[in-house]
Amino acid sequence: MVLGAGVAGLALATALRRHGAEVSILEQAPRITEVGAGLQVSPNGARVLQALGLDPDTIGDRTEAVELRDHAGRLVSRLAMPQEGPGFYLCHRADLIAALEQAMREAGTRVQLLQKVEEITLTDTGARIRTAIGSDHDTPLVFGADGLHSPVRRTLDGPRDPFFTGQVAWRALIPGDGGARVAQVFMGPGQHLVSYPLRGGTLRNIVAVQERRVWAEEGWNHPDDPAALQSAFHRFGGPVPGWLETVREVYLWGLFRHPVTRHWHDGKGRAALLGDAAHPTLPFMAQGANMALEDAWVLARSLAAKPGDAAGALRDYATARQDRVTRVVGMANANARNYHLRAPLAPLAHGVLRIADRVAPSLALKRFSWIYDHDVTA
């Protein structure tokens, strides 16, 4: 049984069904849906989508380039993205969820909605799941794909408090201008703003991050005043002021750092974690959805490789994922600092990037080839 119908849960259910397993999903929401927000799928995630029978080109727009700019809007570095093979995609999160849901239903998975999980008890034969409406579900194996506050994680790992990073983020969608499929990062002292087009340029996604001592709650759905976002980034130039003037609805959340789980599974083949439930990551490497897709594929493959030995399969899965995920989370943490440099470091760092852009334009992409070239479906 899979808990959660997000990227990780839907991908896992589809992958398990393709290996012949009987799968059901419990989802606490009244329907499978997603917030209005963008995400980026990189080649390592695109390969999993293809292996699940999905075409990334029908889900998102292939990224033409990534541009780093200073907060005045001046170009620091431009990285052209590959246009052949598994590529980089700019996706509306709802479109990715819809594609995964369709694949899951076509594979024959049963979904039960309005099933908020209250308690999980590991038994001699598996797990018993108690929901908020008082129903019990018994299953030989439960997968926690239910995000930051996963009850499966609490059962396996115990309570572990995250800490506030000293950063908050706003997200907004505004009408698009039909521009190029370019992701832009505007870097300023103690803050940065990321923007890219969605759905063929009909929408534009904005994520703006600022360092501050006053913390905000975790979660994606805390409304804020657009004027607060505009005030926080009033020193930014280029297209940013025009974009922010069109923001009518904006959400604010605090960025908290959660440790990678110590216990990916229970040791006896009854429960396992994947996606944000196992390794919540800050958004500064755009790898949250990609790591969830990788987890799902590796977990399903590990179980298929050892029928009748769920405990061994879950050990193999954890071994395959722990080091890689921990390294990706660490890179995301480091990028938060790199985007927020102040003088005198900022102009020096930007100068180095400009020189590297001229001398070795592909160097930046090669630096992260260990992420993007990785193929869990091979």
Image (cartoon, grey):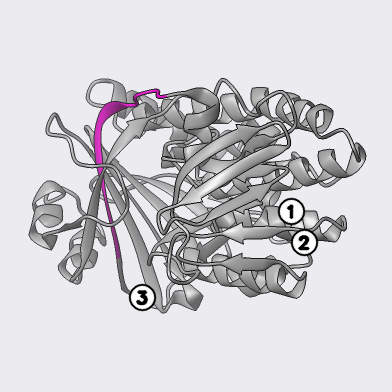
Query: Which residue lies at the image location 63% right of the left edge and 44% below the top edge?
Result: 143
Residue 183 percent coordinates (x, y): 45, 56
Label 1: how many residues lie within 10 Å, few (<14), some (14-19) or many (20+)?
many
User: CB of mark 2 within 8 Å of CB of mark 1?
Assistant: yes
Q: Which mark is residue 176?
A: 3
Mark 2 vs mark 3: which is more N-terminal?
2
Which residue position is annotated with label 1? 48
Q: Please, what secondary structure does the residue beneath circle 3 have?
A: loop
- Residue 161 part of the magenta segment: yes
Residue 8 percent coordinates (x, y): 60, 51
Q: Does residue 297 lie above or below 251 as drawn?
A: above
Q: Nearer the viewer, residue 32 or 289?
A: 32
Residue 239 figure quarter: bottom left
Is residue 358 among the parts visible in the rendering?
yes
Amino acid at dot 2 = Leu
Magenta segment, prevailing SS (helix, strand or loop) = strand
